[in-house]
């Protein structure tokens, strides 16, 4: 541990050996904070029931960083037992990836009912009781200067708030997503459960000294339910990418067709239905665009979506690759001609700046964004990162696919080359900004 470093307690459920997108932001902060005078001490869960694992990410944790893992009781195992779902299914993804027949099963209805009523704010609430005890121990044994919590799951903010209250230490609450009704959160709760959740959300926004959000849309959504918090000290700190992740990587085997890659989970409203219809229309019109393309989908795909793709007339141009380590997935991004981004066409989604977008920027490849008008679409357009089509606009998607093929043939795919933009979204640059925020709360400055 470097001498004279200020210590920050970082509370995060997602931390190696967890894999997936949720772990990257906190992991990179931990990786680089020492460079800016802060020593991270991590509080996370022990033997958590993560949807995916990536043990290789542990290599990015600097030597000597203290990691405390407290006990957690996970209800997801019980969920899988009563529903008969596979061992790799998390409740969040599972409930968003079911077809209507499956949703009608009593076991699924029961599990969603229990989740909506009792798991407030989320199914990790049972971690709270163990984590606050271990957090207190950390505060007693180390001279912590600031508490930082990252959500979702929102239980982490409840832990951060408790430790802030008992210690009087400044607390920074980081929102990677908004809260009530956001994406994988239950859209319906009975009035008493919703009231409890609303009080939780308001108390976190009220008591945190700084509130960080990854996008303006997340901030606006939180304020829409808590207008009295508009004057709080909010800070925008978007997601990013780590150049070091790409250094020395050899691209995976390149397909001889124009390769368009999607990396990440695909479920519920985050699906390629309009893309499929556009491809089917092009095929019906005997347009040669379809035979020029291959789509690689890397990661977990909901059952109804996978079935829809495999029964489509264009099924042969799709390749499914299972979830893989972060490093492996990057080799496939580097072996692509274009990277596919899909953002749900829903009001809340217009404020989403998903971490996947920044990883795509890091790969330096053109981006095909199927997104509603909002922050992601604006970022791609403004910075000439690629093509944008409305998520549900089949005609526009057809046009963009034609443009993409033409650009490839003309050797004019000069997108995603903005060096200033890349510097702005570097993880190390963002960690420097976080360090300034931590310094600020210690001195009560903005």
Image (cartoon, rainbow, N blue to C red):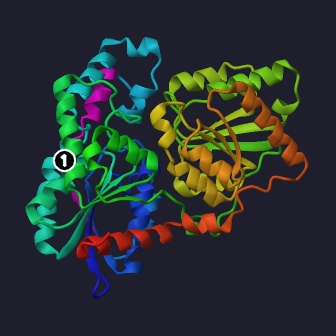
- Is 110 magenta? The answer is no
Q: Residue at x 37, y 76 (%)?
A: 63
Secondary structure, mark 1, is helix
* Residue 423 locus on image (x, y percent): 59, 69
Quadrant location of the C terminus in the rendered image: bottom left
The residue under label 1 is: 203
Q: Nearer the viewer, residue 78 or 403?
A: 403
* Residue 363 locus on image (x, y percent): 65, 58
Quadrant location of the N terminus in the rendered image: bottom left
* Residue 348 locus on image (x, y percent): 45, 36
Q: Is residue 313 above or below residue 74?
A: above
Q: Is residue 18 left or right of residue 123?
A: right
Q: Residue at x 40, y 41 (%)?
A: 51
Q: Residue at x 18, y 42 (%)?
A: 126
Please tell me in which quadrant of the rendered image residue 371 appears. Answer: top right
Please tell me in which quadrant of the rendered image residue 223 appears. Answer: top left
Q: Nearer the viewer, residue 372 or 35?
A: 372
Please tell me in which quadrant of the rendered image residue 421 appears. Answer: bottom right
Q: Is residue 314 visible?
A: no
* Residue 179 locus on image (x, y percent): 33, 40
Look at the image and give the residue range highlighted in magenta. 66-83
């Amino acid at each position: 541990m470097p001498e004279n470093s200020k210590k920050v307690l970082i509370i995060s459920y997602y931390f190696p050996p967890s894999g997936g997108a949720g772990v990257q932001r906190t992991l990179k902060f931990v990786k680089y904070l020492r460079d800016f005078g802060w020593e991270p001490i991590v509080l996370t869960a022990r033997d958590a029931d993560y949807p995916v694992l990536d043990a290789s990410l542990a290599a990015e944790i600097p030597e000597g960083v203290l990691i405390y893992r407290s006990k957690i009781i996970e209800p997801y195992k019980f969920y899988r037992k009563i529903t008969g779902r596979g061992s790799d299914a998390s409740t969040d993804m599972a409930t968003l990836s079911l077809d209507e027949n499956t949703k009608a099963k009593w076991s699924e209805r029961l599990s969603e009912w229990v989740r909506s009523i009792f798991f407030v704010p989320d199914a990790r609430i049972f971690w709270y009781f163990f984590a606050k005890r271990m957090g207190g121990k950390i505060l007693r044994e180390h001279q912590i200067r600031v508490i930082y919590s990252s959500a979702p799951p929102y239980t982490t903010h409840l832990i951060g708030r408790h430790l802030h209250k008992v210690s009087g230490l400044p607390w920074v609450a980081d929102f990677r997503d908004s809260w009530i009704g956001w994406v994988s959160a239950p859209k319906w709760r009975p009035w008493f459960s919703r009231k409890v959740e609303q009080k939780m959300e308001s108390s976190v926004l009220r008591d945190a000294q700084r509130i960080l959000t990854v996008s303006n849309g997340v901030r606006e959504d939180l304020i829409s339910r808590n207008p009295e918090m508009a004057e709080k000290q909010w800070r925008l700190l978007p997601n990013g990418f780590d150049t070091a992740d790409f250094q020395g990587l050899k691209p995976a085997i390149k397909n001889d067709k124009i390769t368009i890659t999607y990396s990440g989970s695909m479920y519920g409203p985050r699906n390629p239905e309009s893309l499929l219809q556009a491809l089917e229309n092009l095929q019906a019109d005997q347009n040669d665009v379809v035979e020029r393309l291959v789509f690689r989908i890397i990661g977990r795909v909901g059952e109804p979506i996978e079935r829809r793709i495999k029964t489509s007339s264009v099924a042969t141009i799709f390749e499914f690759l299972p979830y893989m380590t972060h490093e492996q997935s990057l080799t496939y991004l580097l072996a692509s001609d274009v990277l596919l981004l899909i953002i749900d066409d829903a009001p809340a989604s217009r404020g989403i700046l998903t971490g996947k977008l920044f990883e795509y920027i890091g790969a330096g490849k053109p981006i095909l964004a199927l997104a509603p008008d909002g922050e992601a679409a604006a970022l791609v357009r403004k910075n000439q990162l690629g093509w944008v089509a409305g998520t549900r606009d089949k005609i526009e998607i057809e046009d963009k696919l034609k443009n993409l093929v033409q650009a490839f043939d003309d050797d004019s795919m000069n997108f995603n080359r903005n060096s200033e933009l890349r510097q702005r979204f570097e993880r190390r640059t963002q960690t420097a900004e976080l360090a300034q925020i931590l310094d600020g709360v210690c001195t009560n400055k903005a």
